[in-house]
Image (cartoon, rainbow, N blue to C red):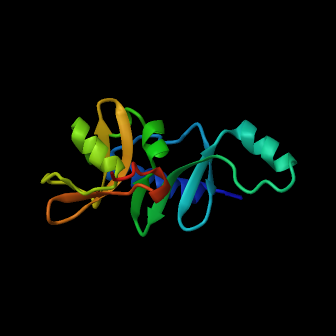
Amino acid sequence: MKVLGSSERKYLQERLKAQYGVEDGFAEYVLIKAGQGRIRATTPEALEVASKLKKVQQIGLYVVKLVKSDIILSIEGSQLLNGKIKKNIIELSEPEAEDWMKASPIQKPVKLGSRYVVAKYGELYLGSGRASRDGKIYPQIAKWRRIPEE
């Protein structure tokens, strides 16, 4: 477990602001590097308890993955930023949200300023998806979280 340093945290904040318009994202959390560009968020109290315990493998909630200069928000990461995400967000209908959670591509021909967008159904944030040039958005949903196809 390696806590993000101030320069790494500043870079993450700059990318969050540029890509999603988020100000002070995850400010109240301690951010931890988890390998493969993944970042987990936890509270200072939980980190303190975990540091006193032996053999702790992971701590916190997986919230962000950094891929080159892009930020991919997990479902939980997008929900923690509820209301702070100002741009590159798409609204889904109920059938689209169900398809999203099956990891099926969504046809949304929208002009976006980023390769990744955050999907929202009502007040529920559903994580990030990769926007392609053909007008489709490909949800970044882990296989174990997907709704199975009938």
Q: Tell me the quadrant of the picture where the N terminus can be found.
A: bottom right
Q: Nearer the viewer, residue 133 or 104?
A: 104
Above or below residue 125? Residue 122 is above
Q: Identify the residue at horizontal 81%, vertical 41% (top origin).
A: 49
Percent from the top left, x then y, of residue 19?
33, 53
Q: Nearer the viewer, residue 123 or 45?
A: 123
Percent from the top left, x then y, of residue 105?
25, 57
Q: Identify the residue at horizontal 86%, vertical 47% (top origin).
A: 52
Above or below residue 53? Residue 120 is above
Q: Is residue 84 visible?
A: yes
Q: Identify the residue at horizontal 79%, vertical 53% (top origin).
A: 56
Toward the top, the furthest residue is 123
In the rendered image, which quarter is residue 129 located in?
Answer: bottom left
Q: Is residue 90 visible?
A: no
Image position of 106 (left or right of 123): left
Q: Nearer the viewer, residue 54 or 8?
A: 54
Percent from the top left, x then y, of residue 26?
52, 42
In the rendered image, which quarter is residue 36 located in?
Answer: bottom right
Q: Identify the residue at horizontal 70%, vertical 54% (top origin).
A: 58
Image position of 137 (left or right of 145): left
In the rendered image, which quarter is residue 48 located in?
Answer: top right
